[in-house]
Image: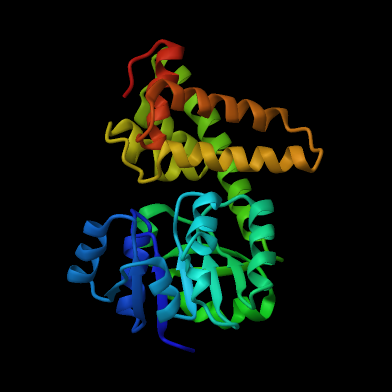
Amino acid sequence: MDTAIGFVGLGAMGWPMASHLVKGGYDVFAFDASRETLEKFTAEVGGHACASLREVGMAAQIVVTMVPTSKVVRAVLLGENGIASALRSGAVVIDMSSGVPGETVELAAELKARGIELVDAPVSGGTRRAVTAELAIIAGGAAETIEAVTPVLRTLGSSVTRMGSIGAGQAMKALNNLAQAGSFLIALEALLVAKKFGLDPEQVVDVLNASSGMNYNTQTKFKQFLLSGTFAAGFSLDLLVKDIGIAVQLADQLGATVPISSACQAAWTEALENLGAGHDHTEIAKVAARAVGVTFP
């Protein structure tokens, strides 16, 4: 496989991911909207700083995008002087953003007309597992294309699962985040009611984790980020609300009635409206605590 890799988006997730590609022996041609971030990355990590998106496409036939939304992905690839304007037939774009499946299907068709393959490969694990290259990667696209780029994906994560055709990876990512968001809320409310009753929160979490009330959030977030008062799990409230919205929108498009998911979406959206942008998702505990009438932590 060609060792030249284009990488767009050096944010909290993208920086460690691109770093692993450099360490893994790939020749990384990077681009970020922040020139300062781009120059800092190449100075500290390595790789090449590209002055434009088109330059990324000229340098590499495999390109990874790690940007906030499907709209941004489209602009990066098909905007004026975007990456696709320079990619040759046979190139592969790996979109690792958490996007909208339907929009990704449309984008894939437009790129296919240019001879460019698209794989959607969103990740789960947050910044901590991005740093350790232990991300769970959920892929959608042609089986042979995913197989061809699996060495690149294996440099970034501990598992690569093909869910199906294009868009399937993003659908699964959104549904996964919906499930974890729902389990977070119900366990949080149980913890807050327990505190109001007079139970010790540390013991409550211990009992949940030794009992049937255990879930990923009680195991990895409640003591670490809620009871500690640090609220720094590394995944923003803004992005979680976006992902929940994608999942509920998907259900609506499929004609599926999901009242619990809709209530979950409403609760997280209300927390975002209360806290504003730029907060860790665990900070919803502050909003929920006020509603229950307890101080927290």
At which x and y percent is residue 98? 53, 52
Q: In this view, does 5 lie to the left or right of 179?
A: left
Q: Residue furthest top?
A: 293
For the C terminus, the image quarter is: top left
Q: How many marks?
A: 0
Q: Which of 278 and 57 is in front in this view?
A: 57
Q: Which of 186 and 248 is in front in this view?
A: 248
Q: Identify the residue at image location x=51%, y=49%.
A: 69
Q: In this view, does 79 lie above or below 218?
A: below
At which x and y percent is residue 45? 23, 71
Q: Can residue 213 be seen in this view?
A: no
Q: Identify the residue at image location x=60%, y=83%.
A: 90
- Occupied quadrant, residue 164: bottom right
Q: Is residue 259 visible?
A: yes
At which x and y percent is residue 134? 42, 65
Q: Residue furthest bottom?
A: 1
At which x and y percent is residue 51? 31, 68
Q: In this view, does 293 lie above or below 132?
A: above
